[in-house]
Amino acid sequence: MGKFVVKYHKWILALAVALLIPCLVGFLNTRVNYDMLNYLPDSMETVQGQQELLDSFHKGAFSMIITEDIDDSTESTLIQEISKVDHVDTALGLGNLESANFPSELLPDNIYDTFRQGNESLIAVFFDTSTSADETITAITDIRQILDGHGFVSGASAMVTDLRHLTETEEPIYTAIAVALALLVMLILLDNWLIPFIFLASIGIMILINLGTNFMFGEISYITKALAAVLQLAVTMDYSIFLWHSYREHLAKSKQHSETARHQAMAEAIKATFSSVLGSSATTIAGFIALCFMTFTLGLDLGLVMAKGVLLGVIGSVTVLPALILIFGNKLEKFDHRSIMSSFKWLSSKIVKFFPVFIILFVALIPPFLYGYQKTNENVYYEIASSLPSDMDFAIANQKLSENFGLSNVHMILTDANLAPDQAVALTNDLEQITGVKSVLNFEALTNGEIPFDILPSSVADTLKSDKWELTLVVSEYKNATDEIANQIENINTTIKSYDDSALLVGESSLTQDMITVTSTDFQTVNTISIIAIFIIIALVTGSLSLPFILIAVIESAIFINLGLPFYTNNQLSFIAPICISTIQLGATIDYTILLTTRYKRERLAGNDKRTAARIAIRTSIPSILVSGLGLFAATFGVSLYCNVDMISSLTSLIARGAIISIIAVPTILPSLLILADPLIIRTTLGMKKLVKKGSK
């Protein structure tokens, strides 16, 4: 393979560049989904209810509009204008009644007060498209133009609209920051001024190919889009460093700098790199594939994209990167400089000398941080809106709804349209008695069971009933993703099912509650699968039964510290962060343990005692661990500082912190454990049992 790549390196590079054109088209045409609730399983009743609402009632997304300082006549005109917006199915407010000459005095006080408080009024808007559909987002934008600063649009679709604008504005900036900081780390730590730019060119080509081929998935989440480039850069940088070091090593052995010598050195480097990154990349891919087993299918979205990215990163490191290095040829040598990294002889000697101290520290740190880690799920938030800046338009609208109208949520209930009138009235009365329910809006509530249905304006009547279903809106005082709303949802479900077994409860709060239920089990599932998969890979790579336990213990302890800290600092995390970080940190930094352990094995088999082997393994591994780990830190830390979307910034912050913890843990804790467990290792590792016979120490 090495000889093939060297022989056709110009054609390989030309092919890679040519692929950028269709991949750029694919990237630009890959739809981005900004609605986390879309990733709930289709089998859930709330998801089915949402679809039924759309199919039977032609109502998908729902928003509340707050208007200020307008009378009923002006509101009526405004409702008519909003109703004409493409994909607005219904706009419902007191203005509808005014335009139909229906006396608002006939309305129950609680319903009138729901829609009018002082100089502010509410208009409920239903769309015939889903919450995050492009058509809905366009409609929200058009409605805001109609309001012209005299009103505010709340709801999930308004949030998605603002979120899309924010991420599209920020992504190019924090991606540039990630690239700049990763470049800075490589310029400082590597031994050549030009090679970091070649690395970035090679990795950049593979990132664009990865992003472009996402077109085959139809769409990706905004979390995946935001993280894919940054993570692929950070995680696959190792492979480029491995190839470069291997190439320089083989070139130095030849003691020549001719084109033939460079080609021969590169062929050998490709062979060596491919062999060394095979196990390394397999563990990283396994970590991302584990995300695909989440019931909440955001994991499938992120896992497939990142696994594909890592695979492309491996391919790029042994095809595109060698081609670029050979094309620049001897020009690279003009940019050589002395690396600032020392030989680490002193540090490696001290670590080995005081290895019992590190073991004691390891044992002492695990209990408190394991406890904090186990409490992680108690310290997460699920309300997507709370992860966004409070000065965004939708957030201002939500705040006004809560403070001025006492309205934080709207549940939507579908019941059989043929339910007996007395049963429908009784159901409405029971719903009104549920704690935290501010008002109930349906045919029975509007008419008190006394006004004929036909007297209602058609715009109102058509909104509330179809041939199959009656729609009920339940206005709640409770905020999304709280214990209060969870209890209320349970009580509403119990109530409606007692009258109609086929009744469905839908809405943002009930979908969020399902998301909480689903993701609470995903954390353990994903973590277990990733550990088992990586254990098997390490066992195959090292040929050992004991080493996988040791290596995973080191990285898992680093994960315990990383995810245990928020419990002690009382920092809340996005619900997705603990699920993803446990696999990303394990998959991305387990490479460091494999690198050091492989060298330790080699030195032991070469006849060195365990302490000498550990010193050599530490000294030779630290440079690669530092460059890789600091590159991962730099790429993600910059994003965490700049990004205003907490779901993204908190995840990248955890990755950055995890990289630093792993950089510290691997060269200190791992060699200490290898020395301590050496007798067990040589008895349970293929090829090392001969050391037992020699009585090696």
Image (spheres, grey):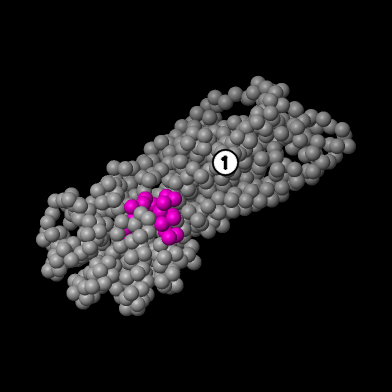
**Numbered circles on residues, count:** 1
In reply to whether residue 350 is colored magenta, the answer given is: no
Q: Quadrant of residue 392?
A: top left
Q: Is 697 or 442 nearer to us in this picture? A: 442
What secondary structure is marked by label 1?
helix
Q: Residue at x 37, y 55 (%)?
A: 435
Q: Is residue 243 visible?
A: no
Is 186 on the left or on the right of 385, as rendered?
Answer: right
Indicate the position of residue 225 as horizontal and vertical percent values.
43, 51
Q: Disc 1 marks which residue?
A: 373
Above or below for 337 versus 585:
above
Q: Does residue 660 lie above or below 132 as drawn? A: above
Residue type, numbered disc 1: Tyr
- The residue lying at 12 percent from left, 56 percent from top is 71
| Region in magenta | 474-491
Q: Quadrant of the C terminus?
A: top right
Q: Residues within 10 Å of mark 1 (few under 14, many from 20)?
A: many
The location of residue 267, given as percent across then percent down, is 62, 45
Query: In the rendering, at what x and y percent does residue 545 appear?
Result: 75, 46
Camera-side residue: 529 or 122?
122
Horizontal side of 300 relative to 127 (left or right) equals: right
Measuring 67% from the left and 22% from the top, which residue is drawn there? 350
